[in-house]
Image (tube, rainbow, N blue to C red):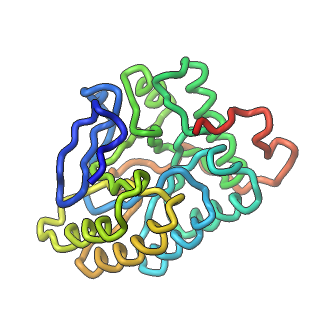
Amino acid sequence: MPMLRSAATVLVSLAGFVAAAPTLQSRVPQGVRDQCVHDLSLSYDDGPYYWEKDLSNIFADNGQKTSFFVNGYNYGCIYDQDNVDRLRHAYEAGHLIGSHTWSHVHLPQLSDDEINEQIQLVEDALWKILGVVPAVIRPPYGEIDDRVYGILSGRGYTVVTWSDDTSDALGEDVKEIQDQYTSIALNESKSPRMVLNHEVKETSVFQVAPQAVAELKNAGYKLVTVAECLNVAPYKAYGSYGTRDHSWTCEGKPAPSG
C-alpha cells in the first residue's frame, strides 16, 4: 500500500486501511476531529465534479448518507451551472456539503488574511448556491496547525480530518480498496470510522462505492454524514437558493493551487 502524502505522517494499519494523522506536525491541535462518535461516515473530497450526482444517488438509493467536502475553484468553478446542479442535487438528498477551502491550498503556508479569504469565498458560494453556510471543514491534505485551527474554530467550524484513508487519490488498486471495505463490513466490533475518499476518482465512484455501500448496509452499518457521526451542526446559517448574477464567477479569485 502506498505511503501517504507526508513523511512526517504517522501511519497505522487499521483493518486494511491506512489510518493517517494530519501532516506538518506530529501533534494534532486539540479539537480536530478524526473519528466518528458513532456509526460510519464515508466522505468525498475535491468536488464538485462530474460524478457527484451518481455518487449521491448510490447512497440515497440505499437509504444512506455521505459528505462532500468541496472546493470553490479546483476541478472547475463552483459557479458553473453543472456544478450548481450537482451541489443542489446532493444537498436535497440530505448529504452534507462541507468546506475544503476555495482553491485546495496548503493552509499553514498562508497568512491569516489569505486563510480567511479561502474560507469566506466558499461560504459566499454555498450561501448563494444552497442558502447555507457550512459549519464543517476538512483542511486540504489534512494539514492543520495551531494557528490554522484557531482561525477555523474561531469562525465556528468543526475541523475534521479522517480515521481511515482509502489512498484512492494516490492510485491505490481498486480491488485492494474493495477488500478494505469488505474487511470493515466483516468486523463484528462495528467501531465508528470516518473514511476519506475522493469524488474526482472515477473508480471510487463507479467501482468502489456501489460495493462498499451495499456491503456495509447489509452488515448492519448506518452510513451517516460527518456532522451526524460527530453530533455537531452541519451548517452555521440557513437561507434559500440564490439567483445567479454577475457575482457568480471565479474570475478574479484565487486560482487552483494544484
Residue 33 in view here = yes
* Near-viewer residue (155 or 199): 199
Q: Quadrant of the C terminus?
A: top right
Q: Quadrant of the N terminus?
A: bottom left
Asked if residue 167 lies left or right of residue 114, the reply is left
Residue 227 in view here = no
The x, y position of residue 230, in whole percent, is 33, 50
Q: How many marks?
A: 0
**From what the image shows, is residue 168 above or below residue 32?**
below
Residue shown at 83%/52% (left/top)? 244
* Near-viewer residue (76 or 237): 76
Residue shown at 28%/30% (left/top)? 8
* Near-viewer residue (248 or 4): 4
Q: Quadrant of residue 40?
A: bottom left
Asked if residue 157 lies left or right of residue 245, the reply is left
Asked if residue 217 lies left or right of residue 203, the reply is left
Residue shown at 32%/41% (left/top)? 33
